[in-house]
């Protein structure tokens, strides 16, 4: 979590030529990312995994999930279940690809249904990790009664919200419906049973590794920028 240390480590790896290529899950995929600039300048093969903004026109290979469509499916699910006041929970960084693209899908679904956006229900947190879920749950607990659905931009946030509302006696899945994103293992646990957007993690890894191997041996992949369709795992939370 130290950008300066990470940049230094990549500098050493590149200068010593200790690696043939990289599979990266960076949070900053922009051309201005110091680490990506280093890799690009060194002409080292690199494949990005997940959360790529397709409008960013990155020069790197990537394997991605169509996150905008995933957010669209998640929000449509909440709308189809009768939710009309839907909270959107995300990292407090509007330009982060995980926020920007999923927010676009969320707003598109509301527009299709003729429902207004509720800026007061955009809950912003400092982390996409479990502490961010606790933070989101605490913020939403202060607004009980103003929302009947929640779309959280990842499962850690969704599960934190779900557990907080359950502790307050809220009937999750009926009074308030919650949908997450990623389908982490905990999403299917008893007592959580989170409806969530599914990313094909094994397929993403397989395709990315195939691209990287071809680049490392000097071949040109048939496809080098791939976006996979998401699906929705429907469980009791939403």
Image: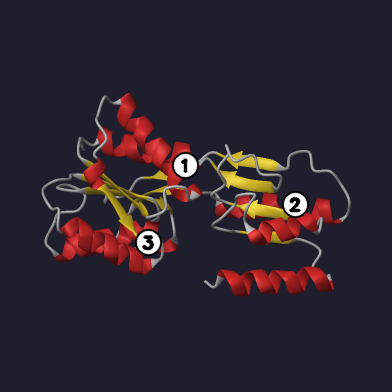
| Closer to the eye: label 1 or 3 | 1
Mark drawn on residue 156: 3
Q: Nearer the viewer, residue 2 or 44?
A: 2
Relative to 55, 163 lies left or right: left
Q: Which quadrant of the figure has residue 184? A: bottom left
Find numbered disc 2 in the image and state the secondary structure of the residue it sits on: helix
Q: Is mark 1 on a helix, strand or loop?
A: helix
Asked whether the residues under the numbered discs 2 and 3 touch, taking CB atoms below 8 Å apart as contact, a structural biologist would say no
Left or right for 48, reference 39: left
Left or right: where does residue 50 sit relative to residue 7?
A: left
User: Which element carries disc 3, helix, strand or loop?
Assistant: helix
Q: Name the residue under label 2.
A: 210
Where residue 97 appears, as percent x and y from the top left, is: 50, 48
Disc 2 packing (10 Å; few <14; some 14–19; many ≥20): few
Pick the front one: 32 or 86: 32
Residue where numbered disc 1 is placed? 101
Give the mark nearest the N terminus, 2 or 3: 3
Residue drawn at x 75%, y 74% is 12
Q: Position of residue 27 (x, y in %)?
A: 54, 57
Q: How far, Cα to Cα, is label 2 from label 3?
A: 30 Å
Tell which circle, 1 or 2, labels the residue nearer the N-terminal end: 1
The residues bearing labels 1 and 2 have C-alpha atoms spaced at a distance of 26 Å
Residue shown at 84%/56% (left/top)? 216
Q: How many labels does the image show?
A: 3
Residue 23 in the image: state x and y as whole percent.
Answer: 68, 59
């Amino acid at each position: 979590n130290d950008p300066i240390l990470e940049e230094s480590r990549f500098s050493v790896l590149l200068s010593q030529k200790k690696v043939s290529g990289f599979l990266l899950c960076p949070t900053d995929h922009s051309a201005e990312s110091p680490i990506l600039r280093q890799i690009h300048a060194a002409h080292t093969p690199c494949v990005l995994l997940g959360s790529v903004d397709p409008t960013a026109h990155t020069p790197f290979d990537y394997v991605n999930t169509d996150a905008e469509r995933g957010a669209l499916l998640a929000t449509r699910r909440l709308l189809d279940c009768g939710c009309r006041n839907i909270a959107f929970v995300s990292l407090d960084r509007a330009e982060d690809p995980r926020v920007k693209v999923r927010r676009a899908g969320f707003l598109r679904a509301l527009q299709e249904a003729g429902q207004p956006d509720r800026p007061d229900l955009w809950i912003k947190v400092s982390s996409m990790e479990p502490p961010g879920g606790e933070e989101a749950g605490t913020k939403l607990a202060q607004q009980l009664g103003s929302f009947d659905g929640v779309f959280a931009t990842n499962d850690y946030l969704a599960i934190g919200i779900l557990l907080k509302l359950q502790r307050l006696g809220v009937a999750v899945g009926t009074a308030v419906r919650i949908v997450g994103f990623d389908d982490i293992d905990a999403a299917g646990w008893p007592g959580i049973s989170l409806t969530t957007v599914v990313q094909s993690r094994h397929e993403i890894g397989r395709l990315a590794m195939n691209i990287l191997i071809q680049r490392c041996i000097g071949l040109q992949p048939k496809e080098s920028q791939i976006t996979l369709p998401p699906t929705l795992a429907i469980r009791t939370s939403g």
